[in-house]
């Protein structure tokens, strides 16, 4: 079994304006390095929700070492993360997938968008 890291990233990762070095932030998230002001947007753990906004410290739990979280976006604050979710929602609506954010993101992964 290979160890993949604490998270994997969406190919078109959404990055907040306050993130100056996204490559370094991604590396730190993947390797479990501590960061104070980083929030991640991930797929929700349950079927009734679509996305979750959590502080990056949540990803340092041992569970994520063997079950990496899938990160759609990174932000420098919770409000910036909410702005990114709103932007994703607007993009989904413009592409005819209003109310189906997760479906929109997954279709973009498959190249349908």
Image: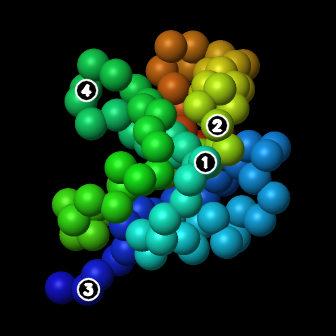
Horizontally, is 113 left or right of 63 in the view?
Answer: right
- Disc 1 from disc 2: Cα separation: 6 Å
Residue depth check, mark 1 versus mark 3: number of the one nearer the observer: 1
Q: Secondary structure at mark 1?
A: loop
Mark 3: few/some/many CA within 10 Å (<14, 14-19, 20+): few
Closest to the observer, 51 or 27: 27
Q: Residue at x 66, y 53 (%)?
A: 12
Q: Is residue 102 visible?
A: no
| Up-down relation of residue 12 to residue 103 (above or below) | below
Q: Are marks 3 and 2 in contact (CB under 8 Å)?
A: no
Q: Quadrant of the N terminus?
A: bottom left
Number of marks drawn: 4
Q: Residue at x 42, y 70 (%)?
A: 32
- Disc 4 from disc 3: Cα separation: 28 Å
Q: Quadrant of residue 7?
A: bottom left
Q: Quadrant of the C terminus?
A: top right
Q: Is residue 108 visible?
A: yes
- Disc 1 from disc 3: Cα separation: 29 Å
Write down the residue under mark 1: 37
Please report whichever mark, 2 or 4, sits nearer to the chain's N-terminal start.
4
Query: Residue 58 placed where, x, y %?
Result: 36, 49
Q: Are marks 1 and 2 in contact (CB under 8 Å)?
A: yes
Horizontally, is 7 left or right of 104 in the view?
Answer: left
Query: Residue 54 placed where, x, y %?
Result: 44, 39
Write down the residue under mark 2: 77
Write down the residue under mark 3: 2
Write down the residue under mark 4: 47
Q: Secondary structure at mark 3?
A: loop
Horizontally, is 106 left or right of 44 in the view?
Answer: right
């Amino acid at each position: 079994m290979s160890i993949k890291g604490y998270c994997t990233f969406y190919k078109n990762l959404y990055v907040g304006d306050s993130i100056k070095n996204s490559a370094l932030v991604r590396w730190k998230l993947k390797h479990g390095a501590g960061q104070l002001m980083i929030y991640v947007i991930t797929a929700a753990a349950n079927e009734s929700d679509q996305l979750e906004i959590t502080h990056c410290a949540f990803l340092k739990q041992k569970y994520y070492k063997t079950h990496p979280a899938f990160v759609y976006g990174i932000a420098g604050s919770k409000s910036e993360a909410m702005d990114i979710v709103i932007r994703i929602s607007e993009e989904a609506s413009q592409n005819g997938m209003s109310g189906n954010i997760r479906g929109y993101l997954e279709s973009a992964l498959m190249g349908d968008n």
